[in-house]
Image (spheres, rainbow, N blue to C red):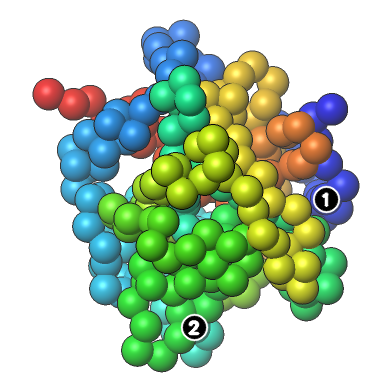
């Protein structure tokens, strides 16, 4: 069954948003997405490097008016940057999957929400090291199993006034029994860990967009992926949508 137990704080005056790029009649959605495909698109978009700061991962990003206000808040915030691991690997058919978690109800914030493994960047720590360290702590992915390759655009969060930097890392599946990940979750932080094919996220009826009113920030789009057993929304849905648009939109030569 698609959809999960997440509590969505949907305002009463929300309305439907736009269709995603992959539902456009002019876009050809591939049946298989490989790591080679993603590497090529990241090189083309100059995202195949590890930024040293969130500013480096954010400057030049096209923001909506709401995101711009959130960015202004985050730029003056004293809150630390967070880094998340967009961990990618190929299944036995050569199709790329990514790793996601459902946050534990024991946590103080964003309880029960689906997210990428990740967390706060410690003082003196690089963004990729923080993302990989957190993945190890949360789901048992050892640092030696991940090769950090690049990044997606950093994003400001409206609720917390902080920055999230998505680090793209490729997993060596030779460390997994039969090439299939076996997650060792930290129950204090993670309730569930799972992986999903990027192509599944572009299947009909999985994604939808809504327009919400954010007090003090105006209106803005909120995306949702309804997957088996969970609803992905918020910053995680924005990161996934950015990744899918990168794959579909950046032509290679």
| Place of residue 153 in the rendered image (x, y in percent of width and height, measured from the top left) | 37, 55
Q: Residue 6 shows which numbered tag?
A: 1
Do we see residue 11 in this rendering?
Answer: no
User: Residue drawn 69% across and 21% down?
Assistant: 205
Is residue 251 or residue 190 the one in the foreground?
190
Q: Residue furthest left?
A: 253
User: Residue drawn 46% across and 9% down?
Assistant: 25
User: Residue drawn 52% across and 78% down?
Assistant: 120
Q: Residue furthest front?
A: 177
In the visual, does 128 lie left or right of 98?
Answer: left
User: Residue drawn 66% across and 45% down?
Assistant: 194
Is residue 84 or residue 146 the one in the foreground?
146
| Place of residue 229 in the rendered image (x, y in percent of width and height, measured from the top left) | 80, 37
Q: Quadrant of the image for the C terminus?
A: top left
Q: Quadrant of the image for the N terminus?
A: top right
Q: Residue 80 shows which numbered tag?
A: 2
């Amino acid at each position: 069954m698609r959809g999960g137990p997440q509590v969505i704080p949907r305002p009463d005056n929300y309305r439907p948003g736009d269709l995603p790029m992959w539902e456009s009649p002019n876009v050809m959605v591939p049946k298989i997405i490989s790591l080679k495909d993603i590497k090529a698109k990241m090189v083309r978009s100059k995202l195949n490097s590890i930024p040293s700061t969130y500013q480096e991962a954010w400057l030049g990003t096209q923001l909506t008016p709401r995101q711009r206000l959130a960015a202004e808040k985050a730029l003056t915030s004293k809150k630390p940057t967070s880094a998340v691991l967009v961990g990618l690997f190929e299944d036995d058919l050569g199709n790329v999957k990514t790793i996601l978690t459902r946050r534990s109800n024991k946590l103080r914030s964003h309880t029960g929400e689906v997210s990428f493994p990740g967390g706060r960047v410690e003082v003196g720590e690089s963004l990729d090291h923080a993302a990989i360290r957190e993945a190890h702590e949360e789901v048992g992915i050892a640092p030696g199993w991940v090769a950090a390759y690049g990044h997606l655009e950093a994003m400001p969060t409206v609720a917390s006034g902080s920055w999230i930097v998505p680090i793209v890392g490729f997993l060596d599946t030779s460390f997994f029994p039969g090439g299939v990940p076996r997650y060792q979750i930290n129950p204090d932080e993670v309730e569930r860990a799972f992986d999903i094919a990027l192509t599944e996220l572009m299947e009909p009826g999985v994604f939808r967009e809504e327009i919400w009113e954010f007090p003090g920030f105006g209106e803005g789009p909120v995306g949702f992926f309804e997957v088996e057993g969970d609803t992905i929304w918020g910053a995680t849905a924005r990161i996934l949508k950015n990744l899918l648009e990168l794959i579909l939109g950046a032509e290679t030569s």
